[in-house]
Image: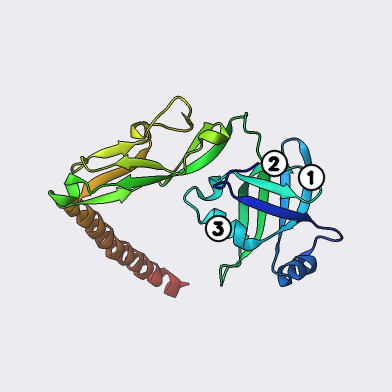
Amino acid sequence: MATSTTPIVVATPREGRFNKNAARRVRVTGQIPAVVYGAGQPSVAVTVDPRVAIRILHSDSGHNTIFDLEVTGTSVVKAMIVDWQNEPIKGALLHVDLKRIAMDKAMRVSVPIQLTGVPVGVKAQGGILEHVLREVEIECLPGDIPGHLDVDVSALEIHGVIHVSDLPHSGSIKFLGDEHATVAHVTAVKEEAATEETAAAAEPEVAKKGKEEAEAAAPDAKKK
């Protein structure tokens, strides 16, 4: 049985052809098409309530939320939303992919990084905080997946840097990729302005050079 805090997604198997017209007919009924796969079992085309899926995607743990999936005619399994499609203009949820999860097997997921606090380099030294890496890939058991990783940047001074290695580590989570990758840093305002001025100054030179080359080539063209 699921606890009161565990979301439950009820899915109904689909039959017939699975094309755009069929998907449109499903949406007219207030449901959306979905696919269930994973755990060494066959894939199943189903329909689900988009409101339930949206609540999961908008929750604190987002797409990393583990929920109880009840497909009509089968036993309840643990699952996650691993992919979804939104309508490009209005943003309505159109389709989701649901993956069955084995709670005793480690899996790879991307977890968002949240910065907390105001850096001393911004508050007292006039710098700018730049959040470079917003998600990090980790490997762990499904039950150990954090909703997000918090990193306190309050002590960060001008030119200070937070790396992946500075994120909260535990024995239950394995970080994948480069632990020296920059998560966030504080830069000086003058450095930012200087970079912009250098880029702006370079553009007229390129344009002028192109004009000079064109004028130099013009006499040759007249001779021909």
Q: Which residue is mark 2?
A: 77
In percent of the image, x 23 and y 54: which residue is there?
192
In percent of the image, x 33 and y 66: which residue is there?
207
Residue neighbourhood size for the residue with mark 3, other residues' Cα within 10 Å, grouped as few (<14), some (14–19), many (≥20)? few
The three-letter amino acid code for the residue at tag 2 is Val
Rendering coords of residue 18 (x, y %):
81, 60
Residue neighbourhood size for the residue with mark 2, other residues' Cα within 10 Å, grouped as few (<14), some (14–19), many (≥20)? some
Q: Which residue is mark 1?
A: 74
Element assignment for label 3? helix
Rendering coords of residue 147 (x, y %):
47, 44
In percent of the image, x 22 and y 43: which residue is there?
154
Q: Earlier in the sequence, mark 3 or mark 1?
A: 3
In percent of the image, x 12 and y 49: which residue is there?
124
Q: Quadrant of the N terminus?
A: top right
Rendering coords of residue 141 (x, y %):
56, 31
Tell whether 29 sits left or right of 140: right
The three-letter amino acid code for the residue at tag 1 is Thr
Check whether the beta carbons of the residues at disc 3 and disc 1 lie within 8 A of each other: no
Rendering coords of residue 187 (x, y %):
22, 47
Give residue 133's quadrant in the image. top left
C-alpha gap between disc 2 and disc 3? 19 Å
Element assignment for label 1? loop
Tell whether 108 sits left or right of 24: left
Check whether the beta carbons of the residues at disc 2 and disc 1 lie within 8 A of each other: yes
Residue extending farthest to the right is 16
Q: Nearer the viewer, residue 71 or 90?
A: 71
Q: Which mark is residue 129?
A: none
Q: Which residue is mark 3?
A: 55
Residue extending farthest to the left is 124
Vertical comparison of 166 with 63: above or below: above
Tell whether 99 sits left or right of 114: right
